[in-house]
Amino acid sequence: MMSGSSTRREFLTRAGAMAAGAALGTCGRLALASASGLDQSEPGRARVVVARDDALATGEPGKHGALLLKVLNAAMQKLTGAADAASAWRTVFKPADRVGIKVNTLGLSTQPAVVDAIIAGLRLADVPAANIIVWDRFDTELGRAGFTISKSGTGVRCRGTDAEGYGSGNRPEIEQSGAVGSAFSRIVADEVDALISVPVLKDHNLAGVSLGMKNFYGAIHNPNKYHEHNCDPYIVDVVAHRYIRPKWRLTVCDGLRAQCHAGPGHHSGYMWPFGGLIVGTDFVAADAVATSIIEEQRKQRGLKTLEEEGRPARHVATAAARGLGIADLSRIERVEI
């Protein structure tokens, strides 16, 4: 006999899957097709670019600004098949877009230098600086991660959802998405119509990995409620919401310094200098490739697989099962540059 909590969890999982599928509808499927068509992969496949440079694995990331932009632009060209960097960025973003760059500032954090390169790329696509916002949950966390808070003016803004005081930066209503009931950040709900997720290449003690999808736990007011069962299906329920899925254009995973164990907090003993970026327009495929890189590093160190440790990255397969992207590595073209 199943326990009451198990029965309820399984019910919520089934209900969440049905609700998310219904929520996609015709418009949602068209949006998915459009997004997956941004790369040059064949139908039913995805392309993810892993762009590395030995120099990025050494020294302070802030000293590699020009090189980071060069590597990112090369990745965008490989991803889109465009002849030049500006054309590559214009394939994904338009001048009228209001772009939200969602960083991760908990534990091992997104490097500001990576975000600077992304902003430079957006400017190549003629996205005005005033249309770009770098954000996470809290101003204090952004500051600790090295970001400069800027809430107004004509340039790029950078602020937390809490910028106007705790809680007031979220929409007042509770939105239901599958098994998740949360108030979403006004930034993701009202202030942007295009999203870039910029996670760090790192593992997570419960979800298995903390990558592009898990990054959007920072868009809801109560992520602490949704860590049961390896955070599955809750991560997928969050990203399937209309405030996120139709807007999500690009994942740029910061792998300058990566971590394969003891995450998401910083643990130097399990870090390694990957020295690269993982870039894709199919966010499920990007997370699948990034997960495989973490597993490869764990194997090299003689560590158990994430599944053997009881924390498989279930949400990646769940996202694929719901039609949000491709998780099967045999259907993902992993381009190394």
Image: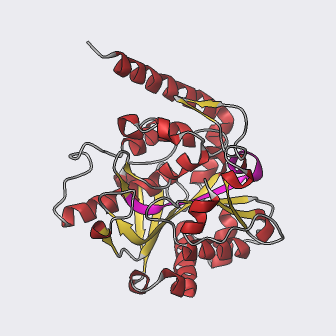
Colour scheme of the rendered structure: secondary structure
Residue sticking out furthest to the top: 1
Q: Residue at x 16, y 62 (%)?
A: 302
Residue 280: x and y, percent? Answer: 52, 61
Closer-to-camera residue (80/180): 180
Total marks shown come to: 0
Identify the residue at image location x=67%, y=46%: 185
Q: Residue at x 39, y 22 (%)?
A: 10
Nearer to me, 309 or 117: 309
The foreground one among 93 and 294 is 294
Q: Quadrant of the C terminus?
A: bottom left
Looking at the image, residue 318 lies above or below residue 273: above
Q: Is residue 27 left or right of residue 22?
A: right
Q: Is residue 33 above or below residue 9?
A: below
Give above or below for 75 relative to 265.
below
Residue 56 part of the magenta segment: no
Residue 192 lies left or right of residue 51; in this view the side is right
Asked if one can make out residue 299 in the rendered structure from this viewpoint, the answer is yes
Which residues, given as a range, are shown in magenta?
187-202
Residue that protrudes farthest toward the left in the picture: 302
Residue occupying the point 45% across, 35% down: 233
Q: Which of the 4 image quarters holds residue 50? A: bottom left
* Left or right for 97, reference 262: right
Image quadrant holding the N terminus, namely: top left
Note whether residue 323 is visible: no
Is residue 4 toward the left or the right of residue 304 in the image? right
Find residue 229 and report its image quarter. top left
Queried whether the magenta region covers residue 194, the answer comes back as: yes
Where's residue 169, x and y in %?
Answer: 71, 47
Quarter-of-image position of residue 136: bottom right
- Please name whichever residue, 224 or 36, is drawn nearer the observer in this view of the structure: 224
x then y, percent, for residue 77: 57, 73
